[in-house]
Image: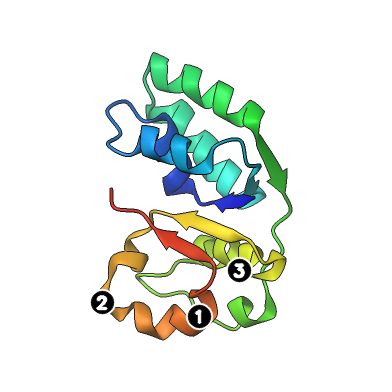
Protein backbone atom coordinates (compact mmCIF):
# COMPACT_ATOMS: atom_id res chain seq x y z
CA UNK A 1 0.00 0.00 0.00
CA UNK A 2 1.42 3.38 -1.03
CA UNK A 3 0.54 6.98 -0.27
CA UNK A 4 1.20 9.15 -3.34
CA UNK A 5 2.05 12.82 -3.41
CA UNK A 6 0.85 15.08 -6.21
CA UNK A 7 4.10 15.01 -8.18
CA UNK A 8 4.15 11.22 -8.24
CA UNK A 9 0.51 11.08 -9.36
CA UNK A 10 1.35 13.49 -12.19
CA UNK A 11 4.30 11.26 -13.16
CA UNK A 12 1.82 8.37 -13.55
CA UNK A 13 -0.16 10.25 -16.21
CA UNK A 14 2.26 12.73 -17.82
CA UNK A 15 2.96 12.42 -21.53
CA UNK A 16 6.61 11.54 -21.95
CA UNK A 17 7.11 10.80 -18.24
CA UNK A 18 10.48 9.05 -17.99
CA UNK A 19 9.37 7.05 -14.94
CA UNK A 20 5.68 6.28 -15.64
CA UNK A 21 6.31 2.67 -16.60
CA UNK A 22 8.84 2.18 -13.81
CA UNK A 23 6.25 3.43 -11.30
CA UNK A 24 3.59 1.11 -12.67
CA UNK A 25 5.98 -1.83 -12.43
CA UNK A 26 7.08 -0.87 -8.91
CA UNK A 27 3.62 -0.46 -7.42
CA UNK A 28 2.13 -3.41 -9.29
CA UNK A 29 -1.35 -4.19 -8.03
CA UNK A 30 -0.80 -2.78 -4.55
CA UNK A 31 -3.39 -0.27 -3.32
CA UNK A 32 -2.69 3.38 -4.06
CA UNK A 33 -3.86 6.05 -1.61
CA UNK A 34 -3.87 9.83 -1.88
CA UNK A 35 -4.88 12.41 0.67
CA UNK A 36 -7.68 14.84 -0.11
CA UNK A 37 -5.05 17.56 -0.47
CA UNK A 38 -3.05 15.53 -3.01
CA UNK A 39 -6.18 14.56 -4.97
CA UNK A 40 -7.29 18.19 -5.12
CA UNK A 41 -3.89 19.36 -6.36
CA UNK A 42 -3.72 16.50 -8.87
CA UNK A 43 -7.16 17.23 -10.34
CA UNK A 44 -6.38 20.93 -10.59
CA UNK A 45 -3.15 20.28 -12.49
CA UNK A 46 -4.24 17.34 -14.66
CA UNK A 47 -7.47 18.91 -15.86
CA UNK A 48 -6.13 22.45 -16.25
CA UNK A 49 -2.90 21.90 -18.16
CA UNK A 50 -3.10 18.24 -19.17
CA UNK A 51 -3.63 17.33 -22.79
CA UNK A 52 -6.36 14.96 -23.97
CA UNK A 53 -4.31 11.78 -23.44
CA UNK A 54 -3.15 12.95 -20.01
CA UNK A 55 -6.71 13.74 -18.98
CA UNK A 56 -7.84 10.29 -20.15
CA UNK A 57 -5.04 8.70 -18.11
CA UNK A 58 -6.01 10.91 -15.15
CA UNK A 59 -9.59 9.61 -15.27
CA UNK A 60 -8.34 6.00 -15.28
CA UNK A 61 -5.81 6.77 -12.56
CA UNK A 62 -8.46 8.32 -10.27
CA UNK A 63 -10.54 5.14 -10.56
CA UNK A 64 -7.61 3.19 -9.14
CA UNK A 65 -6.70 5.54 -6.28
CA UNK A 66 -8.46 5.58 -2.91
CA UNK A 67 -8.87 9.00 -1.29
CA UNK A 68 -7.98 9.20 2.39
CA UNK A 69 -8.63 12.09 4.79
CA UNK A 70 -5.90 14.60 5.57
CA UNK A 71 -4.69 13.47 9.00
CA UNK A 72 -1.02 14.37 9.44
CA UNK A 73 0.92 13.04 12.41
CA UNK A 74 1.65 15.29 15.38
CA UNK A 75 5.34 15.34 14.58
CA UNK A 76 4.56 16.49 11.03
CA UNK A 77 2.22 19.18 12.35
CA UNK A 78 5.08 20.48 14.47
CA UNK A 79 7.02 21.33 11.30
CA UNK A 80 6.90 24.87 10.03
CA UNK A 81 6.33 25.29 6.28
CA UNK A 82 9.39 26.53 4.42
CA UNK A 83 10.34 27.33 0.85
CA UNK A 84 11.31 23.69 0.41
CA UNK A 85 8.59 21.99 2.45
CA UNK A 86 5.17 23.52 1.92
CA UNK A 87 2.03 23.16 3.97
CA UNK A 88 0.56 20.67 1.49
CA UNK A 89 3.74 18.56 1.67
CA UNK A 90 3.43 18.44 5.44
CA UNK A 91 -0.20 17.30 5.16
CA UNK A 92 0.48 14.64 2.51
CA UNK A 93 3.70 13.25 3.97
CA UNK A 94 2.43 13.64 7.54
CA UNK A 95 -0.70 11.62 6.78
CA UNK A 96 1.49 8.84 5.42
CA UNK A 97 3.57 9.11 8.59
CA UNK A 98 0.50 8.81 10.83
CA UNK A 99 -0.73 5.75 8.93
CA UNK A 100 2.70 4.11 8.67
CA UNK A 101 2.58 4.17 4.86
CA UNK A 102 5.38 4.48 2.38
CA UNK A 103 4.82 7.76 0.57
CA UNK A 104 6.13 7.95 -2.97
CA UNK A 105 7.27 11.53 -3.50
CA UNK A 106 8.74 13.50 -6.33
CA UNK A 107 8.92 16.78 -4.44
CA UNK A 108 11.96 18.98 -4.85
CA UNK A 109 12.58 19.27 -1.11
CA UNK A 110 13.39 15.57 -1.05
CA UNK A 111 16.23 16.11 -3.51
CA UNK A 112 17.77 19.01 -1.62
CA UNK A 113 20.93 18.59 0.39
CA UNK A 114 19.04 19.95 3.40
CA UNK A 115 16.83 16.88 3.64
CA UNK A 116 18.59 16.15 6.93
CA UNK A 117 16.39 18.59 8.81
CA UNK A 118 13.31 16.49 7.86
CA UNK A 119 14.95 13.09 7.82
CA UNK A 120 14.14 12.12 11.42
CA UNK A 121 10.46 12.59 10.72
CA UNK A 122 10.15 11.19 7.22
CA UNK A 123 13.10 8.83 6.75
CA UNK A 124 11.13 5.60 6.84
CA UNK A 125 8.18 6.75 4.82
CA UNK A 126 9.19 8.09 1.46
CA UNK A 127 11.10 6.97 -1.54
CA UNK A 128 12.83 9.60 -3.63
CA UNK A 129 11.95 9.56 -7.28
CA UNK A 130 14.29 11.02 -9.86
CA UNK A 131 12.23 12.98 -12.37
Q: Could you say where residue 66 lies in the image, as x and y percent from the top left?
A: 70, 40
Mark closest to the chain's N terminus, 3 or 2: 3
Which residue in the protein does label 3 denote? 94
- Give the Cα distance between marks 3 and 1: 12 Å
Residue 94 shown left or right of residue 53 in the figure? right
Which residue in the protein does label 2 denote? 113
Res. 43 image quadrant: top right
Q: Could you say where residue 129 lies in the image, as x and y percent from the top left?
A: 35, 54
Mark closest to the chain's N terminus, 3 or 1: 1
- Give the Cα distance between marks 3 and 2: 20 Å
Q: Residues within 10 Å of mark 1 (few under 14, many from 20)?
A: few
- Give the Cα distance between marks 1 and 2: 18 Å
Residue 118 shown left or right of residue 62 in the figure? left
Which residue corresponds to the image point at 54% horizontal and 58% vertical from the top-left?
Answer: 103
- Can residue 60 be seen here? The reply is yes
Rendered position, 9 above or below 112: above
Mark closest to the chain's N terminus, 1 or 2: 1
Amino acid sequence: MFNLDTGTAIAFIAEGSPIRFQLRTYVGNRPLLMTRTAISEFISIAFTIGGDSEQARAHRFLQRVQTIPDEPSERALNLKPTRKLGEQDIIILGTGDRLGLITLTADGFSRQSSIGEYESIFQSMFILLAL
